[in-house]
Image (cartoon, rainbow, N blue to C red):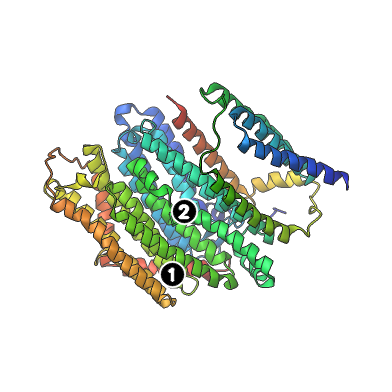
Amino acid sequence: MFTESIPFLQVVVPILPEIGLLILLLTVLLVDLFTRLVRKRTLGVVTGVGMIVIMLANLFVGFSLVNDASYAGTALGGMIRYDMLALMFRTMVLIAGALTAFISIDTPVVGKQGEYFGILTVATMGLSLMSAAADLMMVFLAVETASISLYILAGFLRDSKLSTEAGLKYYLFGAATAGLFLYGLSLLFGFTGETNIYNLAAPLGEMFAGDDTGAFAVAVALLLLLVGFGFKVAAVPFHFWTPDVYQGAPTSTTAFISTASKAASFALLVRVFDAVWPVEVAVYWTGLLAAMAVITMTLGNLLAIVQKNIKRMLAYSSIAQAGYTLIGVVALTETDLGTAAVAFYMFMYVLTNIAAFTVISVISNTTGTDEIADFAGLSRRSFPLTLAMILALLSLSGVPPLAGFFGKFFLFAAAVDAGYTWLAIIGVLNAIVALYYYLTVVKVMFVDPNEDTRPLVITPAFAAVLWISGVGILLMGVIAAPWWNWALNAAQSITAMAP
Amino acid sequence: MTVTTIIFAVMAIFTLGGGLGVVASRNLFHAALYLVLSLFGIAGLFILLEAPFLAAVQVLVYVGAIAVLITITIMVTRRLMGPVESLNRQWPVAAVAAALVMATLGFVLVNQFSGISTAPDVPADGLTLLGAAFVDPAGFLLPFEVASVLLLAALIGAIVVARD
């Protein structure tokens, strides 16, 4: 049955980031064992630099081999798919992981714990696998590897009630939705006898066209999948965990959950629905997703307005951003632009949100809280922080010429191209509402008085993250074309090659 | 009614009744014992499906190791031994939601799978094939290894959460 052997390189190349991350995990645990408490900063540096090296190596190998016929397509017995989309999202996940490691260095408590960096590495590995998974079994394992690590990272501050609550709440919601998700996966396997997602569309389409009970069964299975994905990307009505987890978790964890986890989940969502959805189902499906997108962005934006805590505000903002991104998922059945817009949007979102959470980390290190009021008078206290926060907030709200503007532009363009002009209009209206609460923070930074004169310390690690993400936000905005072409390549790659 | 049907009925009652006991029991310790019963029923179902290896693993790992761990954890944790309130005011809503999910899934299962009455053939050397598939790059090598990393992370996480 399994007699033919695969050449060594064809086993290693498609899982290069995972192999790298496993080596990094063991290295971090060893470094932790042999360093004294005063030198624990090494841990974060090793983790962050390691992830950047892995990302660059994977990019280098990827760009030379991803179109090579002997590597491209499904690999390792169909478990994962090696294509441009996987390469692009793995790059995002590794960037987010590396920047999170740098932020963690100067985050209280977690920065001195080897276990934190170890579990961060495993979470990154799970998310990297999610970006490439092509088999129902691999999909579930990748999601769980990422999720279980993230529950631990969220509840890492055991002395903080909020953090413990965040970890427990995230875990309970995650366990319930994982159960439903797994039920959906098992139904798909039961209907078709296949686990590879690229073999599912044809039998499911037959079932759907067959009779009413068959169509109902397919709809139920796919709805169950949607529960799992909705939870992972924080879309309404599966968003309830988001504000509490974002607020309670250590800020570095929040940065990671809001960026890497969301990006990888969208990669998986796009890949699974593009492959699994038979054409017959797509019509009903896009209607449901469009409704979800509208409710998600509207509710997220409206609830963000009333928040006093900056992490809660960004949590609702992140729900709204998931809503915008869902527009791209709606469009993808009609046009490749949809997938490309999702990929571009997530790339810019990773850089932008990391920048915002870095500024929050610096300020809360001094004040000990995360209120929006802490930002009062920031413009007179620290110019670099103000600049970085303005870049992040304007990019989130989609002001040109920053990356966020092109992100939204491509999403709405994809919607119009796919015939969902009304969805694009609702998106634009929502972006205007969102501008209000993002600019409120800018107003607080410039106008509100503040007696607090304690110095805000931007450590080298924070500075590095701010530089990388800030330059990234500007680059993706001013020179958007190369990134957009990359995203287009990625979008075409999921359908181009034979699985 | 064949012997197989009777055994299936008994095992199904163990599994479902045990599951019901887990959620309905007010004493956490009793719930743990019901869980053992439920897991044991699943092992019986594996035997009926001609998967004796999985049944053995089910008994060794779940009934043996995990149930014992849960029991010990309950015994050494203060304030968990006595009866606890297992229902809150939202239980009617939860019951309706659960009933709806069950009705939907039941409808799907009955409609899609009721025609199937025989288990598919299991190869005689199934265990050998299983072992080979776990270490074959074209088989299940990747999920097998990823599961190990997942367990390692969970292990580290458990230590982080539990240590003083």
Distance Cα–Cα, label 1 vs label 2: 23 Å
Name the quadrant containing residue B33: top right
Viewer-proximal residue, A226 or A40? Answer: A226
| Label 1 and label 2 in one chain | yes
Instruction: Residue B43 in the image: state x and y as whole percent.
Output: 73, 39
Label 1 environment density (alpha carbons within 10 Å; few <14, some 14–19, many ≥20): many
Label 2 environment density (alpha carbons within 10 Å; few <14, some 14–19, many ≥20): many
Residue B159 drawn above or below residue A19:
above
Instruction: Report the residue at 41% width, 65% height from top.
Output: A294
Instruction: Report the residue at 73% width, 38% height from top.
Output: B14
The tally of labels here is: 2
Instruction: Residue A108 in the image: state x and y as whole percent.
Output: 30, 35
**Residue A447 circle label:** none
To which residue does mark 1 refer?
Answer: A338
Callout 2 secondary element: loop
Instruction: Report the residue at 38% width, 69% height from top.
Output: A411
**Residue A238 circle label:** 2
Residue A107 drawn above or below residue A316:
above
Let me know if residue B41 appears in the view: yes
The chain holding disc 1 is A
Name the quadrant containing residue A490: bottom left
Residue B129 drawn above or below residue A203:
above
